[in-house]
Amino acid sequence: MPGEQLQVLNALDVAKTQWYHFTAIIIAGMGFFTDAYDLFSISLVTKLLGRVYYHVDGSPTPGTLPPNVSSAVNGVAFVGTLSGQLFFGWLGDKLGRKRVYGMTLVLMIVASIGSGLSFGHTSKGVIATLCFFRFWLGFGIGGDYPLSATIMSEYSNKRTRGAFIAAVFAMQGFGILAGGMVAIVVSVIFKNRFPAPAYSVDPIGSTVPQADYVWRIVLMFGAVPAVMTLYSRLKMPETVRYTALVARDAKQAAADLSKVLQVELENEAAKVQQITTAQSNNYGLFSKAFLRRHGAHLLGTTTTWFLLDIAYYSQNLFQKDIFSAIGWIPKNTTMNAIEELYRIARSQTLIALCGTVPGYWFTVAFIDVLGRFTIQLLGFFMMTAFMLGLAIPYHHWTTPGNQIGFIVMYGFTFFFANFGPNSTTFIVPAEIFPARVRSTCHGISAASGKLGAIVGSFGFLYLAQSQDPAKVDAGYSTGIGVRNSLFVLAGCNIVGLLFTFLLPESKGKSLEEMSGEKEEQVQVGSYGSILPV
């Protein structure tokens, strides 16, 4: 009912920041650490897979994955992620956040290990098995998006909710960084233990048999952080907002919150019944009422995430191709297989360290100061500016002596993606929809983003090919080149900026205010501090 606010929800909204919040951030954040590691580590090892399984005797260049195989290896996890976001997002609203949360992590652990144990009698058999496990890995990762965001938003107080959700998402940066560091460590160990000549010296000897273990170790390591947090995730309590507003169990909601608050909370069964059965709070996802209240919001969250991920993933997955194009990574014929992995991992780690990770944490620091809307607009605008700054004088950046400047500009595009729409597109859908469809709507928004990632990763494989037939990678046709691809990505950012105007500002407001489940915020004093369960 308008003007009514449950005591348990007020208690959450005004609670002081305590260790309990940080525990939730770590538990949920380690899932995102694992997600990012698993999704982006494949881009580190694709060239090694090409050398190991697609070597052609007599070829002047090392083996590479054929276009269709490369698309499958890079994209199948995204297809799984998209499916998982829709399925687990819906399931999180039907069964509860807690009951579904552990399933996703178990699936990620099994699939990570399975990816590294992909065997077969032929190269096609190995790649097919790898793609099978990568799909289910993505399916589990997909569930983490709506569930982690929804759980963190429903645990948080309204004053610092944005920073808490952003901190969970920021663990992606450390996951990307960890992927590069693990690849560096493993490649250095194997490179020193099993030295090999460059491809131009000995095409067969440049890829030692032990190189087949390297990519497997890198991929399987993704299971380690997931295993470390599995028990804690299974022990997390159900969110009070789900218990009260969706399950309609006022007694259990009060009991759960009483465990972590320093006060006794009354059983508000009558008020829960009034609020949850009121016609204004009882519409479904496919109703006219939802379309009228949140249709524009859902359009905004889906389109901005879709457009952002086209630009973000096309850059991130194929950094190694850009580094090669500007001369930061030597020609592949001058290196052996493990040396090439080392160079790729080192380059991606540097970008993650200087551009990706800082951007995430700038969002954590400023999102509850500047607001989601401002940060998203700023991010899209600056990404557009830096991409045009790369594309317009592209020939200048690729001439000898200017490559460092290119990398700096390229790093800033990642900084403003993460201090911008890559973070806010994750946060906003967890705040502006009603509790009963919050996880589902976040899953739909995230799935739209992954559709953009699929478009970006597949499209960039072909679009970024040189316009000169002599410089096209084996198995590909001519494309529009890296320079023109950057113009296309800048255009996506401009459109994303425009669709941002469909989204409301949620800074400092309760979830019930944003979702329309409560029209007026009842002012309540602090209920004390929150303690760990």
Image (cartoon, rainbow, N blue to C red):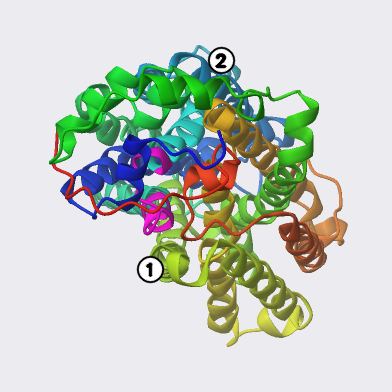
**Which numbered marker is on residue 88?**
none
Q: Residue at x 49, y 36 (%)?
A: 145
| Image point (76%, 66%), residue name | 490
Q: Is residue 97 visible?
A: no
Give the residue at mark 2: 125
Q: Position of residue 165 (x, y in %)?
A: 41, 49
Of helix, strand and loop, which one carries label 2? helix
Decide: few, some or many residues near mark 1? Use Cα within 10 Å; few <14, some 14-19, many ≥20: some
Dividing the image into 4 quarters, which one contains the N terminus?
A: top right
Closer to us: 196 or 18: 18
Q: Position of residue 132 (x, y in %)?
A: 54, 17
The type of residue carrying mark 1 is Ala
Quadrant for residue 394, please give it. Answer: bottom right
Q: Which residues are magenta?
A: 153-166
Q: At 53% from the left edge and 49% from the top edge, which residue is drawn? A: 520
Residue at position x 73%, y 49% from top?
300
Q: Quadrant of residue 46?
A: top right
Q: Is residue 21 visible?
A: yes
Separation of marks 1 and 2 at Cα, in angstroms: 47 Å
Marks 1 and 2: CB-CB under 8 Å? no
Left or right: 337 in relation to 374: left
Q: Is residue 161 magenta?
A: yes
Image coordinates for residue 326, horizontal then vertical, percent: 63, 72
Is 160 in front, or is 183? 160
Query: Quadrant of the image for the C terminus?
Result: top left
Residue designated by label 1: 365
Q: Is residue 181 left or right of residue 516?
A: left
**Per the image, is 526 magenta?**
no
Along the line of sight, which residue is nearer the eye, 34 or 291?
291
Instruction: Name the main secondary structure of what is drawn in magenta.
Output: helix
